[in-house]
Image (spheres, helix red, strand yellow):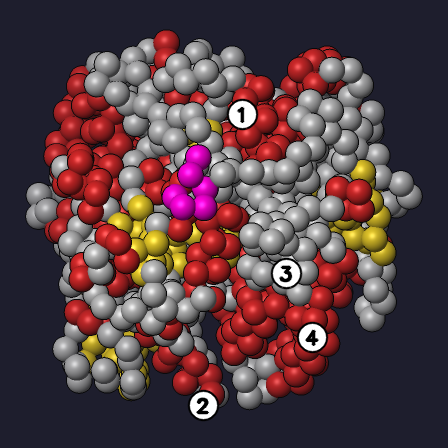
Amino acid sequence: MTLDPKIPPGPLPQQWDARRKALRTLDPSAAQGYRVIIVGTGLAGASAAATLAERGFQVEAFCFQDSARRAHSIAAQGGINAAKNYPKDDDSIERLFHDTIKGGDFRSREANVYRLAQISNAIIDQCVAQGVPFAREYDGYLANRSFGGVKVRRTFYARGQTGQQLLLGAYQAMMRQVQAGRVRVHPRTEMLDLVVADGEARGIVVRDLVSGEVQACAGDAVVLATGGYSTVYFLSTNAKGCNVTATYRAHRRGAWFANPCFTQIHPTCIPMAGHYQSKLTLMSESLRNDGRIWVPNRQGDTRPPAEIPEAERDYYLERRYPSYGNLAPRDIASRAAKAVCDEGRGIGPGGQGVYLDFADAIRKLSRKTIEERYGNLFDMYQEITDEDAYAAPMRISPAPHYAMGGLWVDYHLMSTIPGLFVIGEANFSDHGANRLGASALMQGLADGYFIVPLTVADHLAGRPAGRRGSAAHPAFAAARREVEERTQRLLGVRGTRTVDAFHRQLGKLMWDECGMSRSAQGLTRALAEIPRIREAFWKDVAVLGGGEELNQALEKAGRVADFLEFAELMCRDALHREESCGGHFRVEHQSSDGEAKRDDARFCYVAAWQFADDGQPPVLHREPLTFEAVPLSERSYR
Amino acid sequence: MNFTLRVWRQKNAADAGRFEMYEAKDVSPDLSALEMLDLVNDELQRRGVDPIAFDHDCREGICGSCAMMINGFAHGPQPAVAACQLYMRHFKDGETITIEPWRARAFPVIKDLVVDRSAFDRIIEAGGYISVDTGGAPEANSIPVPKRDAEEAMDAAACIGCGACVAACPNASAMLFVAAKISHLAKLPQGQAERARRVLDMVERMDQEGFGHCTNHYECMAACPKSIHVQFIAQLNRDYLRAARTRRPSGCKSD
């Protein structure tokens, strides 16, 4: 099988229009004959569910949360990008496209990124029409701010709760379709396997998390909108429930996994505090608009920050990247923080933090202005750390945040399994090796509102209607049996160590060896260690209770079991990619001043991994990347 | 720090439920209330005791999953935080802490501290949206919205749907939740066309779900992790009265 990305011919600006015209459509009465299964109800899933239902499809939407409105998109703080150019900064679709390609360190597909930039403006129109209360200027028009890696103001925001407001918009649009009888939402229901029959995605196996009942659900197409896998590190900015199970199970059924080692470490999070800490809280990147990042010049300088004179401080981002300064992209800012901490200049307990200082901004703009801009973030910081960031600088530290890698999809967002579509963070498509701030919300909604409804219709238009509801194919019973057996196996171990203990152990290993910097030696060690943890897990994990009830330990155990397989794929991908690009930093491949060194001659491709079998190495396939509109160049933010 | 926990345990909806006592030892003051429950659950599992079930997800106060009465207060005694943002440094060392699920007829207990809040989804389904299909929306800046209106809409839209307002209300009323959504959409020009129908339909569904009436205790606002203001209930009442006076005959409700 070869990888066909199905990129339309012709010049970039015309590709999407041309393809859209060529896609087959279904009128609403014909669409009624098809059932689309959507897993995940975040920005991508809820917007896809609403739009497909508006166009007549019968939609079954699944989420593991108790309400569709709680998907993790809700936690996105900063904003959403669009090329509206309202502030007259000379922004344009071309510029957003260019910034995103460069931000992704030339490891994304030009055609997809161009389309994303084109769609960005329609997203803002749609959200405003839905009643999303974006921030506005005194004249009543929409306000914009700037974000990392970008020199124009193109980020729309709703205080520090942009993700929440966009998600509520999509959720409400979906609930409108529930009322219309075209969407059924299944909360507290987790997808545990994909059903592939006669070479096509035909359904999923789910577990009702309250009754424990395992059921198969059949449909004409399956859309995965299940988010990213940063919780492989245990501690991350992601919600506790975020997991890789849906995409990894699909991978085992034949969907190829692309660039799994491309993960994003966010530079501005509250530092780790203790053993039972369960998550790392993000402080919005928007803080870097006014905050200045620094560490002491001298190693082991433990004086309180106020006692360190200006001359003895190192504003290292401003020093190393004078052009972008504190607004350097996330991968670069995180790595620079790690570098100063590795030199022994990190601050706070454990020496893993750096200061984010607002003293200058408060002096220049007044405390009131800073309160207006970031008040809720300062309050949050105070709650968590018991420290007042108006009086002393914040302590921040990098933390796992986002997965650029995901299931491989073509230009239609379809995976290597016909009928299986993957949208939002769950796919790999638009961010290359590093995502720019405020681009995840843009991508999730572009996929869900504007792309997948068209491509799903095109896929189904050529197929017989009325197959829905038919779970008669033996593949359904087989997949269901496998899920039940696996559940019984997890419950049958009756070991002595909790699921969290194994998750922490895996997370620490991944952070050390496949986190912010990676080496052949460390990755090789991780690849030897992961199977040992996995073996220990299946011998000694403690999952109490039974399968026919609400059993949160059992839910977690299934997710961690999948992480214990998936982590190996991540490390294998990181080991094979002998270059540094974006968030993937191989210590062997850096310039003399510590910058990432790409190897375009050998690695200018998407690595798509095909599952072989348990105990067999996965098979690598390559989708070559070509850059015509933005010539390959060294990515510099100096 | 050390605490004695008095925790509601209930195997399922049919079980009568009861309080059980547990010790939480060596708790760092920097742990959140949920992280303390993680710690207790680790210990319980080591002893072969079924861990305490509780809803949680983002652990930064925005998803609205976590929901528990702590010492008789929804999300605990600290103002303006969800239980996941409640830090143990606010408690006294050696204190006995009582933890229970939301108590409301419309929120039946599923297990331990986990309750069924799907009634909220059904209220939104009844009309908590602006009816606009994807595509073809007008240019975003074609309708300016006064900053003050946008800010007020945002104040209301900040609701996380956790249900603390219901849990705190002596009548188990959902008025603050419903009022927040009504007000969010009523403050914006885009929400005007369906304004009357929305408030009638949402209030009707709220009543059907078995929530109680509002008798102005304001406990909801005190408990709300997002400090949603009761002024929005006044807005709801005004909108409801105006809409009820001009109510169209039944049958015109859906279009």
Badge 3 is on which residue?
A: A587
Amino acid bearing label 3: Val
Residue at (70, 13) in percent of width and height? A14
Residue type, label 1: Leu
Looking at the rendered image, the disc whose residue lies closer to the viewer, 3 or 1, is 3
Helix, strand or loop status at disc 3: loop
Percent across and percent down for residue B52 are 39, 74
Spatial CA distance of label 2 from label 1 is: 56 Å
Instruction: Report, in whole angstroms, how far the alpha carbon at label 3 lies from the one at label 1.
Output: 30 Å
Residue at 43% across / 12% down in the picture? Answer: B139
* Tag 1 residue: A96
Which of the two discs, 4 and 3, sits closer to the camera?
3
What span is colored magenta in the figure? A318-323
Q: Earlier in the sequence, mark 4 or mark 3?
A: 4
Q: Looking at numbered disc 2 in the image, what kind of residue is underneath it?
A: Arg
The relative height of residue B162 versus residue A605 in the rendered view (above or below) is below
Q: Which residue is mark 4?
A: A525
> Disc 3, disc 1: CB below 8 Å?
no
- For mark 1, name the chain: A
Going by the numbered disc 4, the residue's amino acid type is Arg
Compared to residue B213, the image places residue A495 above or below, namely below
Outermost residue on the top side: it is B142
